[in-house]
Amino acid sequence: MRNILSFLLLLPLAAIHAQTDEVNITIDKLGQNTYMLTGSGGNIGIYVGEDKVFMVDDQFAPLSEKIKTTIGTLTDKPISYLVNTHMHGDHTGGNVNFNTNETVLVAQDNVRKRLQVNGKEKVSANEMNQQDYEKTLPEITFSEDMTFHDGDETVMLFHVHNAHTDGDTMIYFMNENVIHMGDTYFAGRYPYIDLNSGGSINGYIEAHKKALLVIDSETKIIPGHGRPSNKAELETFVSVLEDVRAIIQQEISAGKSLEEVKSNQNLTSKYDADYGTGFINPERMRETVYLSLTSPIKE
């Protein structure tokens, strides 16, 4: 857990590095009017509607101009709504730059609450001014679900509980048949589950199952991190996580300690080559699942 906490503390440093010329914003077209933008940080979703743009997440603040320029190659329509899938800085760091008179920030209730806590701490430490703090906050929040209508398109927002965090939102563009899952899905790699912000392995798996109820075999999935995915890959990933959870639970029931589980490479070896090469390595995955199954959810 110490490494995970260090990662969160280093997010501002990562944002500074994100302004280097090496970061390019790339585009994947997923539907007639829907795109995924990849740069540094969480994947961005863009839907170009009849007269407005619907945006999901905004990466780090130093990348905002590059992101705006890239969106400008797709459309000259204004960004009317920007949804934060959750509160982490690699998905909300650009809020201050995108929050204008023509763009409204939207998120689940807990996202605003956590951004308020973090922002006030930065203001008190003179790391952020009051005006910028206020611009980081979503202006519209919801508890469980929200629906937007744009011509024939219906955009569904739904909250999934205690998954990656306690404020995760998935966004489904119905006619486009594209879903943005935020960090409730790390395609092709073990996920980062933020236990200190209300995340849990059980909630994470349930979030996947909720997405599977909505999508079909033709749905394009925008993960929080990784390449565009599909239902078959998500189903496989759910099976992997359920098996890893069962393996760790068996160890817990047998009285094994956290250190014993962390150091036992055999427990997850059948999945590690395919899923353990990302930010969350196999040992950290075993640690996260163990702590999630043995500790109360942190609100």
Image (tube, rainbow, N blue to C red):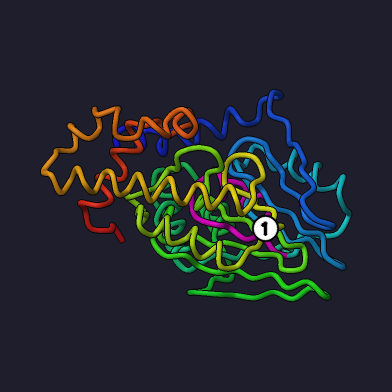
Above or below 81: residue 7: above
| Magenta-drawn stretch contains 83 | yes
Q: Residue at x 62, y 31 (%)?
A: 18
**Residue 137: x and y, percent?**
54, 60
Report the side of 35 relative to 56 (left or right): right
- How many numbered marks have been drawn onto this rendered protein structure? 1
x, y percent for residue 14: 53, 31
Nearer the observer, 258 or 110: 258
- Neighbour tally class for label 1: few under 14, some 14-19, many 20 plus, Cα within 10 Å: few
Indicate the position of residue 242 as horizontal and vertical percent values. 38, 51
Query: Which of the 4 image quarters holds residue 27?
Result: top right
Q: Is residue 81 left or right of residue 144?
A: right
Q: For residue 238, say whether it is visible.
A: yes
Residue found 41% across the figure and 39% down from its top: 8
Q: Which residue is mark 1?
A: 217
Give the structural element (helix, strand or loop) at label 1.
loop
Magenta residue span: 81-98
